[in-house]
Image (tube, rainbow, N blue to C red):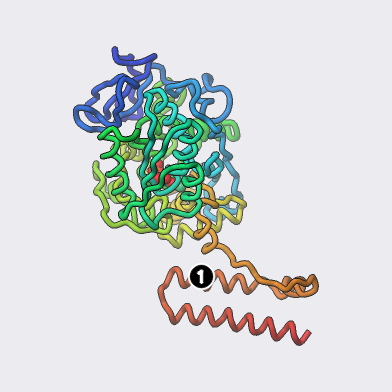
Amino acid sequence: MSLELSAPAQTAPGCADDGVWLECIECAEQFGPFDDIRYTCDSCDGLLEVRYADPPTFDEFEGRGVWRYNAALPFEVGVTLPEGDTPLHEVPRLREDIGVDRLRIKHEGMNPTGSFKDRGMTVGVRVAKELGVDRLACASTGNTSAALAAYGARGGMETLVLLPSGKVAAGKIAQASLHDARILEVDGNFDSCLDIVQDLAARGEAYLLNSLNPFRLEGQKTIGFEILEEHYEDYGEYPDRIVLPVGNAGNTSALYKAFRELVASGALDESEVPKLTGVQAEGAAPMVEAVREGNDEVRRWENVETKATAIRIGNPVNAPKALPGIRNTGGTAVAVTDEEITDAQRSLAGEGVGVEPASAASVAGLRKLRESGEVDADESVVCLTTGHLLKDPDAAFAAGDDPEPVPNDTEAVLEHINAGSSTSAVGRVSKGVSNAVDSPLLTAVVGGLGIAYLGYRKLRSKSE
Ligand code: F0G
């Protein structure tokens, strides 16, 4: 089974354990799944994939959550909290506004630690147990560290997390800290953290649980199975397109693998596979560059910046798996600005769906592709939102309205309410402007408006 969508199922090689083995996507060398600790190919250092002699069909799936899909996983059950079974929200106003036939939001922020990483960790930490390791490690922009800390704690194992100093949202550090990970803050970006963790893993100091680890992606495949099953149940067909935020491109690779396995088993027709569409922030968009320029390899961006810190990544390690996924499904990739991300975060929140900035990139990307005509009005689209709003309280506060101080008195509170909500509107504009344009003059003008309004309100309440 190559990375082609039409690749047929393979016969198990001698090294397979119960029909499961590891295979290099570059040179096709095969390895036993648990006979040694390895993350990449011994011969050529290519990425490894978990392969199965028996690819899954829909009627084998039973139960709930990630382990419902154990016919497509290397174990019956893992170290579980439990995870998966996340909502596929309808968002009618947003759908209307963006202008597509159907729009659903697969909210991965509803997993136990608030991101899709839990799906990978329930499998990854189970594999760590199988291999008999006792110290787990990852580099992270935050969510992987939160998930690893929680699942490591659940499994009774020691965890080390390496984070880019000053660039990880508060909620995520709080989680890693309370779940008892050792948090090592590196004076560098995510990509430097990953370089160090890979060195530590190569020296046998810790078991690496970044998405370079092929078993993590097995758990994340289940996002694809869930979307297909639920969409089919609701509409009798699969979505035309799945739009998702891209950092290391682990999810893009995992979803593509889910589709390939279903095609190999005959459960899904090639023509029914959704178009995988990746979204990155403009300041960290090496995958978009590669897709748009038709390159087979991704150029590492040394300097990356975006408010969507979860996807502040310049060297997407899973690109060799993800690029064929985007191309072979007829998908595309697009970059969005931080302002477009914040707008999308507000739009989702306006439908009751609270997500962190990186997650909102999917919706921002869909809007952009719809406006440019690359996405058609008659499409049925699922956007993946990868992390919960509370992961990044500072971003949520900056995008939302300020609290309004009121006196400790019912009459005064009522009067304040009836005076309208313009203060918060001014507050929002003022914050938006000072964030978007670093112009002291503009900020002063808008800030002045706010002060003028507060003065007016004071006068008004005195005169009545
Ligand atoms: N969205 C969120 C909220 C993330 O935390 C990440 C990755 C992504 C999207 C990108 O997913 O790597 O599969 O393309 N976060 C990693 C971390 C890097 O360390 O938490 P991808």
Q: What residue do we see at 29% from left, 47% from top?
A: 315
Total marks drawn? 1
Amino acid found under the numbered disc labelled 1: Lys
Residue 267, position as x, y percentages in the image? 46, 23
Q: What residue do we see at 72% from left, 84% from top?
A: 460
| Residue 379 seen in the current view | no
Which is nearer the eye, 6 or 78?
A: 78
In the rendered structure, the answer to whether residue 228 lies left or right of residue 276 reads right
Residue 177, position as x, y percentages in the image? 47, 47
Q: Where does the C terminus fall, quadrant-wise?
A: bottom right
Up-down relation of residue 212 to residue 398 (above or below)? above
Q: Is mark 1 within 8 Å of ligand 1?
A: no
Residue 321, position as x, y percentages in the image? 32, 36
Q: In which quarter of the view is residue 426 placed?
A: bottom right
In the rendered structure, the answer to whether residue 106 lies left or right of residue 413 reads left
Q: Residues within 10 Å of mark 1 (few under 14, many from 20)?
A: some
| Residue 439 seen in the current view | yes
Q: In which quarter of the view is residue 104 placed?
A: top right
Residue found at the very far left of the displayed protein: 43
Give the image quadrant in which the ligand numbered 1 is located: top left
Up-down relation of residue 67 to residue 295 (above or below)? above
Residue found at the very far top of the displayed protein: 14
Label 1, on which residue?
A: 431
| SS at circle 1 | helix
Which is nearer the eye, 347 or 157?
A: 157
Q: What residue do we see at 31% from left, 36% from top?
A: 324
